[in-house]
Image (cartoon, grey):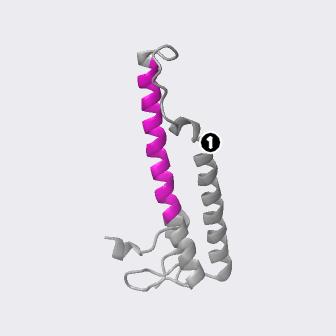
Amino acid sequence: MTEPLTANQQEALRQTLVERLAELQGMDALSEEDRKPVELDQQSVGRLSRVDAMQRQAMAFASQARRQHEARMINAALGRIAEGEFGYCGGCGEPIPLARLRLDATIATCIDCAR
C-alpha cells in the first residue's frame, strides 16, 4: 500500500505546478505575435510568404491550445490541493505513488484506475 504524501512533498509538487503555470503563461505571451491575423496585402507579402505565415499562425494556435489544456489540468490539481484531495486517486481513493506524481503532478488517478 502506498503512503499518503507528506506536507513537504505536497508543497514541493504544488510549487512545481505553480512554476509550470507561470512558464505556460510566459510562453503564451511570447507567441502572441504569431497568432495575429495574416496580412493579405499582395504588395507587401508574396503568396509563398503568406502561406508560410498562415502555417506559422496555425502552429501557434495549436501550441496555444495545448498550453491552455495543460493550464486547465494544473489548475484542477491546484484545486485538489486546496480541497485536501491532492495525491489521492479520484477513482478508488487510494494514495497515488509519489513517483507517479513527480512524473506528472496533474494526474488524478492511480495506475490501476487509469487502465
The image quarter in which residue 110 lies: bottom left
For mark 1, give the secondary structure. Answer: helix
Nearer to me, 51 or 80: 51
Residue 104 seen in this snapshot:
no
Q: Position of residue 16 (x, y in %)?
A: 63, 64
Q: Position of residue 24 (x, y in %)?
A: 59, 53
Vertical comparison of 107 with 6: above or below: above
Q: Which residue is mark 1?
A: 30
Residue in view at x 57 percent, y 73 percent: 78
Residue in view at x 49 percent, y 40 percent: 60
The image quarter in which residue 102 lies: bottom right
Q: Position of residue 59 (x, y in %)?
A: 45, 38
Residue in view at x 45 percent, y 24 percent: 40
Vertical comparison of 23 with 104: above or below: above
The image quarter in which residue 10 lies: bottom right
Vertical comparison of 46 with 101: above or below: above
Q: Main secondary structure of the magenta part?
A: helix
| Label 1 crowd (10 A; few <14 / some 14-19 / many >=20) | few
Residue stretch in magenta: 49-72
Residue 78 seen in this snapshot:
yes
Residue in view at x 62 percent, y 46 percent: 29
Q: Position of residue 79 (x, y in %)?
A: 55, 76
